[in-house]
Image (cartoon, grey):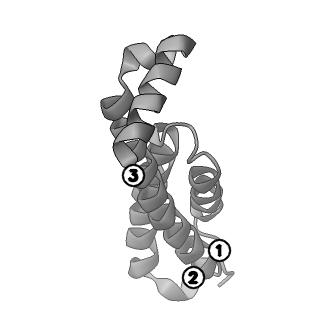
Amino acid sequence: MENQKLPNATAVLVLGILSILTCCCYGLFGLILAIVGLYLTHKDLIIYNGSPEKFINFKQLNTGKILCIIGIVINAIMLLYFIWIIKMIGFEALQDPALLQEKLKQLQSIGR
């Protein structure tokens, strides 16, 4: 019997890498990529557990799963950070440079 590759292992690996690389996109895009990667991992694990001797790229799937988990953690932290920034500065200040400078000066004076 010929060894086969798990159908979504490469996609999971790519999604895990992209989720980490896109963490600066407000955390939302990378979070979505990582969740999709974990969903595909779950589907492949069901296939793999049925007959593990058939498949040769389980390590690739496992690496992708680990990257997706790291991506979820990093993107969740980034999302919470951007929510905190909007809460502290305000959405209006992010759109007006003069108001943004005023808010930043206020925050600096609070920190002293």
Q: Residue at x 34, y 40 (%)?
A: 84
- Image location (x, y in percent) of residue 37: 49, 55
> Which of these two is toward me, 67 or 109?
109
| In the rendered image, the vertical position of residue 52 relative to residue 112, given as above or below | below
Which of the labelled discs sits on residue 61, or is there none? none
Q: Which residue is mark 3?
A: 76
Which amino acid, mark 1? Answer: Gln
- Image location (x, y in percent) of residue 77: 41, 54
- Image location (x, y in percent) of residue 17: 64, 58
Q: Residue at x 65, y 51 (%)?
A: 21
| In the rendered image, the vertical position of residue 89 relative to residue 78, given as above or below | above
Tag in front: 1 or 3:
3
Q: Quadrant of residue 53?
A: bottom right
Mark 1 vs mark 3, CA separation in Å: 35 Å
Q: Do the residues under discs 1 and 3 have CB atoms within 8 angstroms? A: no
Element type at mark 3: helix
Tell me if mark 1 has few (under 14), some (14-19) or many (20+) residues whose alpha carbon lies within 10 angstroms of its own: few
Element type at mark 2: helix
| In the rendered image, the vertical position of residue 76 relative to residue 83, given as above or below | below
Which residue reaches farthest left?
87
Tag in front: 2 or 3:
3
Tell me if mark 2 has few (under 14), some (14-19) or many (20+) residues whose alpha carbon lies within 10 angstroms of its own: some
Q: Which residue is mark 2?
A: 54
Q: Which residue is mark 1?
A: 4
Which amino acid, mark 3? Answer: Ala
Q: Residue at x 56, y 51 (%)?
A: 19
> Which of these two is toward me, 6 or 68?
68
